[in-house]
Amino acid sequence: MTRSGGRGHVPGLRGRLTYSQIDPSSGDRLKTLVGPDLGFVPKAMATLNFNTVLATDSAGTLYRIDVRTNNLSLALMSAPVQIGTGWTHDKLVYDGHGHLYGTAEGMLLQYLVSQPKPAGSQHIGQRRDIGTGFVLKALASTGDDRLLANTADGRLIEYRIDSAGGWSSKLLASADWSGFEKLVSPGGGLYYGVTSAGGMYWYQDVNPTDGSGSDIVYHNDDPVDTSGWTQTLLSAEPETVACMGRNYAYVLSQSAVPRSELDDPHPTTQPLTYRYRSAHRCTRSRAARSATSTAASATASP
């Protein structure tokens, strides 16, 4: 599969797989490609890596979608492969470090992914029930065991999951995020939200690990697009954009969990590697950083 580095990669589903590239430094959409019909109506999806997407249908069937190219066209290696049943989750998200998360009736669950292209329960397992009460409007991952969600009452919340399966939360915004039907993040503190009208807006968390939303830079006057994002589901290739000093860099995410986390490690688990290229500026001017939360909240949920 061909791809360019240093850009946000956003697969989507609307009966067909779509693929979009977004420049992390400007928020400009660089291209969108539409692939073939998948042959099923998707309910939830998660992107594992640059050529592997997981999706479910309303019957609970889990499919693996293998992408052949997203350069000049979007083509699949083959028809989607059925790799599981009983996947009745309303949301799925992958953190780029071997952890697949899903919500079902308010329960947050974690699974370990041990292969870049899982073939079934032998590669997606060790289910862990994290907790209840996760009634969320949209769910995304921002990093290793870090989740981002918004709620119907407008809160923006970060969740962190520890190695024992415990969780904690930080309130990044107390209101005005209810207008987003979908949230995605390729890492690097970049958050993208899509409204019911199909507009995509982008935000930069200057320090995404500090548990504070006070340093989120709002770009409501410069959206990715004001309309057109009509996919029923969106996902992002996880942990593939990082802020390195003053520039954005492409990071090769981890396609499978570290062997140390597996109950039964096997030698084909993939190691973590990094690759940097095509850097873009990720720090903002003083004026941009000083945008107040009051001004941002007026347009955060258009």
Image: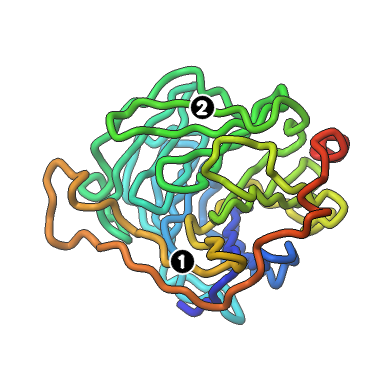
Q: Would residue 21 be found to the left or right of residue 50 on screen?
A: right
Between the residue at mark 2 and the residue at mark 1, the CA separation in whole angstroms equals: 26 Å
Disc 2 secondary structure class? strand
Closer-to-camera residue (269/211): 211
Q: Say which quarter of the image contains residue 210.
A: top right
* Image coords of residue 24 (percent x, y): 65, 64
Q: Residue furthest front?
A: 286
Quadrant that contains the N terminus = bottom left
Which colour scheme appears in the figure? rainbow
Closer to us: 220 or 59: 220
Image quadrant where one finds the C terminus: top right
The structure residue drawn at horizontal position 34% and vertical position 39%, both measured from the top left corner, is 85
In this view of the protein, can residue 158 be seen by the observer? Answer: yes
Indicate the position of residue 116 as horizontal and vertical percent values. 32, 60
Mark linked to residue 169: 2
Residue 198, x across and y down, in percent: 78, 49
Q: Mark number for residue 251?
A: 1
Q: Which kind of residue does numbered mark 2 sit on?
A: Ser
At x 55%, y 34%, the residue is 158
Q: In this picture, is 288 found above or below 5? A: above
**Residue at 39% of width from left, 36% of height from top?**
87
Q: Are marks 2 and 1 in contact (CB under 8 Å)?
A: no
Between 244 and 191, the one nearer to me in the picture: 244
